[in-house]
Image: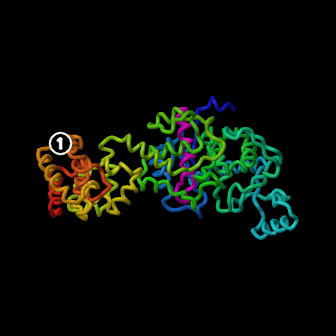
């Protein structure tokens, strides 16, 4: 069947067994981008047939995670569609109907063996130094399936399979990859190997984005497609996500974490979408950022998905996040910063949101994501913005002065100049002091003002500090500095 003449349908089909990590979200993203590129359909299907491993709340967590990144589905557990439920646990009748088709064709049979008997077969195979294959132990007499015993697929033909993968090209695997696998377990639930093929066919899925670990199972899938007499979808094997050093796949021990932890840390969803898209996909050229989803969709093609693994470089994610922060409107940057300030700062005596608004660029200057602002404010790095700083008078001394007392007349002159200054921008503050600073020396004036306003040797420039603090507090702090200096 010519896939190009079909409407593109893709899906993301996670199991609700815990948090959604980077690899899963990237798989969903590629499926989403490709569907949108071709004005197709993107489906969210939940593969919840392993009830022993299911974690309460995972389905909602999956949906929240995808939506945070910007991935929205056309049909899913919360969006009715033409295919019935998108929870596999609600589709048992469909799987049983397909199972009966296979039984009628002689391609499925109930497993007659106990756990102990199967273990004995495995032990015997190991003692003979050969792989255990269930097809070597097919029962000579096939009993009727009562739905209580596991139902196994009887591989129609033990042969070499050859197939095409968009990223891997032509692939092939021989007889050793085929065996009689379980279709439906004793509890009545289908296995992944069976259910996903039935669902993909029922839902008209044309392209399957999947991790590389599924390549070795493809011959089993192809045998089942053949037995059901249904066409193969287009397979797109995604490159693994590697550690930053590129030496092994990223795992939990290497920092792989719940995608929503990045939201908590203050990464922007647009940055995460860009970052994930570019792990294993190269649009060509030097472009590293797509500032709109539309741009990303237009650029996305399957042909530019890499075969080799892509590195998870958190420093690059931080850099990307910074670029997207810089693109936010002034109001959005203010809200971003406001959400980053910890409670202990909000309890300081001079805290107010107008001062926060004036200090936005100061907060964002060195921060690449919210957690850096939170950690710095928790450590007291921004306390001087909202409370009178404490400092030793000696640091008011400029390096060219013999004593600290040289700073006092300059500070008094600065007060005089600032009394009639417009504090509406840092530049208006600068314009009132600059001529005097050039006259007596920039460091001679600006250094003690910086210390007076911040109590720190490293801080924003004094014009920005004065703008943030406002006229009244600026003059008060400079007067306090003058009082500290005993001539």
Image coordinates for residue 421, horizontal then vertical, percent: 14, 44
Image coordinates for residue 167, horizontal then vertical, percent: 67, 39
The residue singled out by tag 1 in the image is: 432
Is 449 placed above or below 273 here? below
Residue lying at 76% horizontally and 60% vertically, measured from the top left: 111
Q: Is residue 319 left or right of residue 139?
A: left
Q: Is residue 198 left or right of residue 472?
A: right
Image coordinates for residue 198, horizontal then vertical, percent: 65, 46
The extreme top residue here reads 5
- The answer to which of 425 and 272 lies nearer the viewer is 425
Q: Which residues are magenta?
A: 14-40
Q: Is residue 484 magenta?
A: no
The extreme bottom residue here reads 116
Is 146 placed above or below 107 here? below
The extreme right residue here reads 128
Q: Residues within 10 Å of mark 1 (few under 14, many from 20)?
A: some
Q: Secondary structure at mark 1?
A: helix
- The answer to which of 1 and 94 lies nearer the viewer is 1
Q: Is residue 39 magenta?
A: yes
The quadrant of the image that shows the N terminus is: top right
């Amino acid at each position: 069947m010519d896939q190009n003449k079909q409407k593109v349908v893709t899906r993301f089909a996670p199991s609700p067994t815990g948090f959604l990590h980077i690899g899963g979200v990237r798989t969903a993203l590629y499926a989403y981008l490709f569907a949108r590129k071709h004005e197709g359909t993107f489906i969210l299907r939940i593969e919840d047939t392993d009830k022993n491993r299911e974690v309460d709340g995972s389905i909602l967590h999956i949906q929240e995670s995808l939506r945070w990144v910007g991935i929205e589905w056309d049909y899913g557990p919360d969006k009715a569609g033409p295919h019935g439920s998108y929870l596999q646990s609600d589709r048992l009748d469909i799987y049983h109907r397909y199972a009966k088709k296979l039984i009628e064709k002689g391609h499925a049979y109930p497993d007659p063996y106990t756990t102990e008997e199967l273990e004995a077969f495995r032990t015997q195979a190991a003692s003979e130094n050969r792989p255990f294959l269930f097809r070597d132990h097919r029962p000579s007499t096939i009993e009727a399936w009562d739905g209580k015993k596991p139902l196994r697929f009887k591989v129609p033909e033990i042969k070499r399979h050859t197939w095409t993968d968009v990223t891997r090209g032509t692939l092939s695997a021989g007889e050793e990859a085929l065996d009689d696998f379980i279709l439906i377990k004793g509890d009545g639930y289908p296995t992944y190997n069976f259910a996903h093929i039935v669902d993909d066919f029922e839902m008209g899925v044309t392209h399957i984005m999947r991790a590389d670990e599924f390549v070795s199972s493809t011959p089993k899938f192809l045998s089942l497609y053949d037995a059901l007499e249904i066409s193969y979808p287009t397979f797109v094997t995604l490159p693994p996500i590697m550690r930053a050093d590129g030496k092994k796949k990223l795992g939990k021990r290497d920092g792989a974490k719940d995608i929503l932890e990045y939201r908590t840390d203050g990464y922007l969803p647009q940055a995460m979408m860009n970052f994930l898209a570019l792990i294993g996909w190269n649009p060509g050229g030097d472009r590293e950022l797509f500032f709109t989803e539309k741009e990303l969709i237009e650029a996305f093609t399957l042909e530019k998905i890499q075969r080799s693994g892509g590195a998870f470089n958190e420093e690059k994610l931080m850099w990307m996040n910074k670029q997207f922060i810089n693109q936010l409107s002034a109001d959005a940057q203010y809200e971003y910063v406001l959400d980053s300030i910890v409670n202990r700062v909000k309890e300081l005596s001079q805290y107010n949101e107008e001062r926060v608004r004036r200090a936005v660029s100061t907060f964002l200057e060195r921060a690449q994501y919210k957690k850096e602002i939170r950690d710095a404010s928790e450590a007291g790095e921004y306390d001087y913005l909202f409370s009178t700083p404490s400092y030793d008078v000696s640091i008011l001394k400029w390096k060219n002065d013999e004593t600290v007392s040289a700073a006092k007349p300059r500070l008094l002159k600065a007060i005089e100049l600032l009394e009639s200054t417009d504090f509406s921008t840092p530049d208006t503050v600068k314009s009132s002091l600059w001529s005097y600073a050039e006259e007596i020396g920039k460091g001679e004036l600006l250094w003690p003002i910086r210390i007076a306003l911040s109590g720190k040797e490293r801080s924003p420039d004094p014009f920005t500090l004065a703008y943030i603090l406002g006229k009244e507090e600026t003059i008060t702090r400079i007067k306090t500095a003058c009082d500290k200096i005993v001539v």
